[in-house]
Image (cartoon, rainbow, N blue to C red):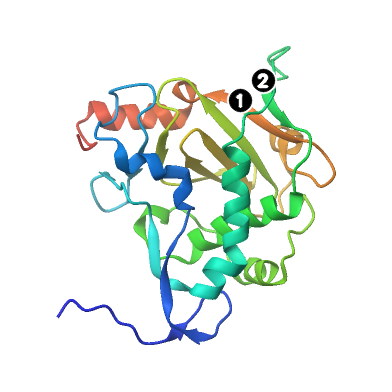
């Protein structure tokens, strides 16, 4: 009783019958330090925490990351997706030059003059796909409206697509609580379906339908042969922070 089922099962990516592994949906390196922190929300400026606010249960902390043992074989996890995860981890752990805001219409941003568009875009697509196919409640709000198969083929072929295909922009969060990590959110804005992913200090917005791209996403979306622009935002000024603060005030966050 309690033994894990070790029979081969179809890998959701390559469709081969293999033993599946405990694959992280979001790379573990993004929240390694979370496991070493013993302090809850509101206790300091750099307190990394994952808050899983599922639709049918009280929010809870997840200090080992969110993984799924039912979607990927070892080859797909380590050899196909693994290099993109590693590239994104190394990229976002670097220090970037910051361009200060010159007006309300021109926000502050970080600039990376040279980056690998293919590997970074495939990283974002792989997280989107993993979040869509997993049954982990943390990712309940991810709904890519039947695009799972199209993205699966892009991943298998190593095809990041054009910048306008599933456009994505990155954000660096500054200030208090910037290391808090919450479950992905989804919103429909003027017909555009947008998914927002959060990891400590960073986030990204991913459009998953063919609606016109809004002005901000169009400006910041990652493009091949162009610098990578990462929008700078204070996390304590965002709607996500306000929602998290309300949960804390209502006593719905764990200590």
Q: Which x, y percent locates residue 218?
A: 75, 38
Tell me, yes or no, whether the two marked residues, 1 and 2, touch with CB atoms within 8 Å. yes
Q: Is residue 30 visible?
A: yes
In the picture, the disc for residue 108 is 2
State the residue lying farthest toward the top. 102
Q: Is residue 211 above or below residue 144?
A: above
Is 157 left, or right, of 197 in this rendering? right
Secondary element at image label 1: strand
Q: Quadrant of residue 151?
A: bottom right
Q: If you read the primary sequence from the N terminus, does the residue marked by circle 1 or circle 2 appear first?
A: 2
Q: Quadrant of residue 232?
A: top right
Q: Which residue is mark 1?
A: 232
Residue density around tag 2, few if under 14, some if 14–19, many if 20 or more, within 10 Å? some
Residue density around tag 1, few if under 14, some if 14–19, many if 20 or more, within 10 Å? many
Is 215 left, or right, of 205 in this rendering? right
Is 43 left, or right, of 138 in this rendering? left
Image quadrant containing the N terminus: bottom left
Q: Is residue 44 above or below residue 172?
A: above
């Amino acid at each position: 009783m309690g033994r894990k089922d070790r029979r081969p099962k179809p890998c959701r990516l390559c469709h081969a019958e293999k033993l599946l592994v405990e694959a992280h949906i979001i790379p573990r390196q993004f929240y390694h330090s979370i496991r070493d922190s013993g302090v809850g929300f509101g206790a300091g400026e750099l307190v990394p925490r994952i808050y899983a606010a599922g639709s049918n249960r009280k929010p809870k902390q997840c200090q080992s990351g969110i993984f799924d043992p039912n979607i990927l074989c070892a080859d797909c996890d380590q050899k196909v997706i693994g290099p993109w995860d590693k590239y994104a981890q190394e990229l976002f752990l670097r220090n970037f030059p910051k361009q200060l805001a010159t007006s309300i219409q021109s926000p502050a941003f970080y600039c990376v003059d040279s980056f690998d568009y293919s590997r970074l875009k495939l990283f974002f697509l792989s997280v989107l796909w993993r979040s869509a196919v997993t049954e982990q409640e943390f990712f309940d709000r991810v709904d890519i409206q039947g695009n799972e198969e199209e993205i699966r083929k892009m991943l298998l072929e190593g095809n990041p697509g054009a910048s306008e295909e599933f456009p994505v922009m990155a954000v660096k969060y500054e200030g208090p609580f910037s290391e808090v990590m919450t479950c992905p959110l989804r919103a429909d804005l003027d017909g555009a379906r947008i998914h927002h992913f959060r990891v400590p200090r960073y986030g990204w917005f991913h459009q998953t339908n063919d609606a016109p791209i809004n002005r901000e996403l169009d400006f910041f979306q990652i493009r091949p042969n162009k610098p990578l622009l990462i929008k700078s935002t204070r996390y304590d000024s965002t709607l996500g922070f306000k929602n998290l603060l309300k949960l804390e005030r209502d006593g719905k966050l764990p200590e």
